[in-house]
Image (cartoon, helix red, strand yellow):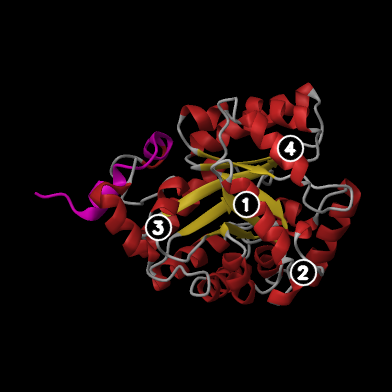
Amino acid sequence: MEATPLDKVLKLRPTNVVMRLGVQSRLPVLNPRDLIASFEGRSALLLCVPAFSGAAIPGILRASRDEDAVVGIACPHPLGARDTPARFVEALRDAAEEVRHRKPLFLQAGPFRLVSSDPRTREQLTSAVYKYVDAGFTLVSLDASRLPVDEAVAAYRELAPAAIERELSIEITAPLDEVHRLDVAALRATLERLQKTRVQPQFVRVPGRAYALEEHPREVWQLDMAVLKEARDVVRGYGGWLSLEDEGLAPDQLAPAWLEGGARKVDPVEASARIVLGSWSEALREQLRELARTRGLHPRDLIASLDPADQDAKVKLKAEALSWSMTVDTMPPAGLRGTASAAIAHLSFGGGY
């Protein structure tokens, strides 16, 4: 029997995906590098939705199906005590099978944030990266941006081999200066030095505070377009794509600015965290805020440690519905409607690697 376009696309899945899902799986989890290639001639960007709760996964997949859109799903690090990267991928597989999801997607691990050069910390983080890669993730996001350039480059070289060996995509985070603006000189120096190594990032992630004129923006005028375009020009000069860690609260309103600024990938981190927290009780949200204050972390980085969705059906259903709503509303202005079918058509006729 002649192979279908989906059959051909499934052959492009990275080996770690096939090992995790099995050869019988029909879920096209791909390298985002291939999906970007399928956007040629189209004004669109990869929407990578952070799943701070596993309950968000079915809603994200339904939005992808409803809009015939390529999508990315990010698994945070660290996870809660009850969770593992493998369990996250198993939950994704089960949710996809339940709705017979066959749209191309990618899975992002992290970001993995390194804030010191302590050898033990780096060793632990390197081990965590391997676990995510073995679980089937196709993009590894690394953040050593708080370290001096030389130390950051050394950290990326130590953390990246698991992704390099499997020819997966790598994302690094752009360094910021003391007032949290893009440090162009440090970014150029980082990319210049990485060019001489095996670490060749496909994406460079710019934190939201580097280009937001106001905290948690909702409107296009609250973004600094000059910063976005400057970052884009630097990153493209080294063969990468601009990625945004957006802290806005209205991704459907901000998507046109992301495109105008030259972004090719966006993680709506704050909006995704807010919709999960919107399904929690106020008492649990206050517990999260107190835990974050105690540990000196952002509350969203600890959502997984307190997430009640696996124990409360009402919380789970609300988180799923809110995730669907945000994702499905953002996809059209991000240029994503119809990109799933277009990607399958492109990749099945020799557009993959």
Q: Is residue 223 magenta?
A: no
> SS class of the residue under badge 4?
loop
Residue 144, numbered label: 4
Q: Which amino acid does label 4 sit on?
A: Ala
Q: Mark 2 points at which residue?
A: 216
Which residue is more in the foreground, 125 or 302? 125
Label drawn at residue 265? none
Is residue 322 or residue 47 the one in the foreground?
47
Label 1 or label 2, whichever comes before in sequence order: 2
> Between tags 2 and 3, which lies in front?
3
Q: Position of residue 292 (x, y in %)?
A: 84, 53
Identify the secondary structure beneath mark 1.
helix
Q: Residue 233 carries which label?
A: 1
Q: Specify the amino acid type for callout 3.
A: Glu
Q: Which residue lies furthest to the left in this view?
A: 1
The picture places residue 73, in percent across and down from the top left corner, at 53, 55
Disc 4 from disc 2: Cα separation: 24 Å
In percent of the image, x 79 and y 65: which residue is there? 285
Identify the residue under disc 3.
40
